[in-house]
Image: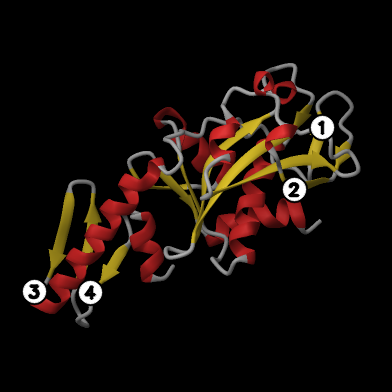
Amino acid sequence: MNQSKIWNFIPKRDLLKSSNPGYSIKVKPFGLIFNGPVFQGAYNNICMKITDIIRTFKDRNMARKTEVDIEIDRLSNSIVNALSGDVFDTEFHKVSKKEIKKKDWLFDWNIDLSDRKCEVYKMTIKDNVKIIQGLVSLIIKQEEKYVFVNLVENAKFNRGKNKLYEGVGGNMFAFACKKSKDLGFGGFVAFEAKTTLKLYYNKTLGAEIALGQRMYIGEEAANKLINQYFNN
């Protein structure tokens, strides 16, 4: 992982090199520990980076603060009919307001559709584009070089014990990783997770904790998801 990625996602365990060879800093939950003397030039650069981190972290609300709590029931080659076991290929297209009925969704997707920063996609089964299996809202972080999952939701018939299809949540995160990789960001994806689900997303998606509720999917985990859903 390169230095810019470390700063963007603030993984506490990663060692960051200062601009002076032989000196380093390590991110901690409540500040920074400096190993060795830090000269003024390096110190100024570090302070600037810290400012960027705080700004980026405070800007996590973006269109609104939404914590991801989608179920990752299974990772499959596509999505799977929960009753028959039949596998169906999926595709993603940008969605319009007229395609979404508010009563069918837990979140008000018109908020993200009205926000220019957000790209909202529908996931459908190939050759059946009128039935939406799930929705995902992405924000492209060009400067930091990652994709932020601002909102993600299964269709109501894909939730709970009587769901119609499995693998929908994983498919949408795989799409976000593929979008990141296609943009040259290495597959890096970030999102805000509910506190109680951070370990769950670590186990199911390979996501790592950055800071607080912010999690990120790194290059290795992203490639695994992409290969699972898009390279079969």
Q: Give the residue number, with chain letter if any, for mark 4.
A: 18
Looking at the picture, the colour scheme in use is secondary structure
- On the rendered image, what quadrant is the N terminus found in? bottom left
Q: Amino acid at mark 3?
A: Pro
Q: Is residue 201 visible?
A: yes
Q: Which label number is shown at residue 131?
A: 1
Labels 3 and 2: the sequence-earlier one: 3
Q: Which label number is shown at residue 93?
A: 2
- Neighbourhood count class around disc 2 (C-alpha, 10 Å): few under 14, some 14–19, many 20 upward: few
Q: Amino acid at mark 1?
A: Ile
Q: Nearer the viewer, residue 188 or 25?
A: 188
Question: Of helix, strand and loop, which one carries label 2?
Answer: strand
Q: Amino acid at mark 2?
A: His
Question: Of helix, strand and loop, which one carries label 1?
Answer: loop
Assess whether mark 2 and mark 3 are in contact (beta carbons under 8 angstroms): no
Question: Can you give x and y, in whole percent of width and height, for residue 126 in the image?
Answer: 87, 44
| Whole-number angstrom distance, CA of label 4 to CA of label 3 | 10 Å
Labels 3 and 1: the sequence-earlier one: 3
